[in-house]
Image (cartoon, rainbow, N blue to C red):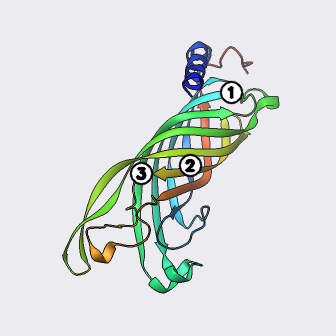
Amino acid sequence: MKKLIVFFAFISITTSSIAQIHEIGVFVGGSNYIGDIGSEYYINPNDFMGGLIYKKNINPRMALRGTFTYAHISADDANSTNQQRYYRGIGFNNSIKELAVGLEFNFFEYNIDDFRKSKTPYLLVELAAFNYNIVSKEPAPKNYEYTSNTSFAIPFGIGYKTKLFHDFAVAFELRARYTFVDDLDYNNPKINTLTFGNPKSNDWYMLSGISIVYTFGRPPCYATPY
């Protein structure tokens, strides 16, 4: 693993001087939660997500990227195929604000200025921090007080991008987030009415959608200017 990290760092440093192409844009799509409530399907977008994205292409196979994402998540046991959950009958809704940074690895060389290299599938490896709401206490039965919490997630994903027209590109992307918390659904072992599910299984959330980015900056030396 250490050798792999050193290898990617070496590529980034030795190629950054030849890349001047930047991308900025927006993405929209669906989000869903996987945890102790509702559906157990991993890819099941049932809520809205959207955000902003920035990329710096450091060579034709790799890009640095940063994203800000707002996602709504919700689940209801009424939508579960698990009979125990279905008859339990609880639900929730929450919101997530996420900042993520990482690397985008292209399967093929990608260069929007060359029609032969203007599309490719890609992999994502990122680090993410996110803010969400939790229940802090129960002053009266089923009357809760809320606060916010910040935690981290291990994000990874796949996508496919292609030139749209002129300096614009479009991408279709699926991102998975494994979190280090079990309370996206307000699970709280200190409150009896909010103690449910498997305490050893942390929550996930998924982001799936489409992005449109605008490319700008001086073409790198590996690109043929217009």
Q: CA distance from mark 1 to mark 3?
A: 31 Å
Give x and y (percent) for residue 153. 45, 47
Q: Give the side of residue 62 with respect to residue 192, left or right.
A: right
Q: Which mark is residue 61?
A: 1
Q: Residues within 10 Å of mark 2 (few under 14, many from 20)?
A: many
* Circles 1 and 2: CB atoms closer than 8 Å: no
> Does residue 201 sit above or below 14 in this rendering?
below
Q: Furthest residue to the left?
A: 139
For marks 3 and 2 on the same chain, the one whose residue lies earlier in the sequence: 2
Q: Residue at x 50, y 51 (%)?
A: 178
Q: Residues within 10 Å of mark 3 (few under 14, many from 20)?
A: some
**Residue labelled with disc 2:** 27
| Badge 2 amino acid | Phe
Give x and y (percent) for residue 150. 33, 49
Relative to the observer, which residue lies in front, 147 or 111?
147
Q: CA distance from mark 3 to mark 2?
A: 25 Å
Q: Quadrant of the C terminus?
A: top right
Q: Residues within 10 Å of mark 1 (few under 14, many from 20)?
A: some
Q: Residue at x 61, y 54 (%)?
A: 209
Q: Residue at x 33, y 73 (%)?
A: 194
Q: CA distance from mark 1 to mark 2?
A: 22 Å
Q: Which mark is residue 180?
A: 3
| Badge 1 amino acid | Arg
Q: Give the side of residue 84 with respect to residue 15, left or right.
A: left
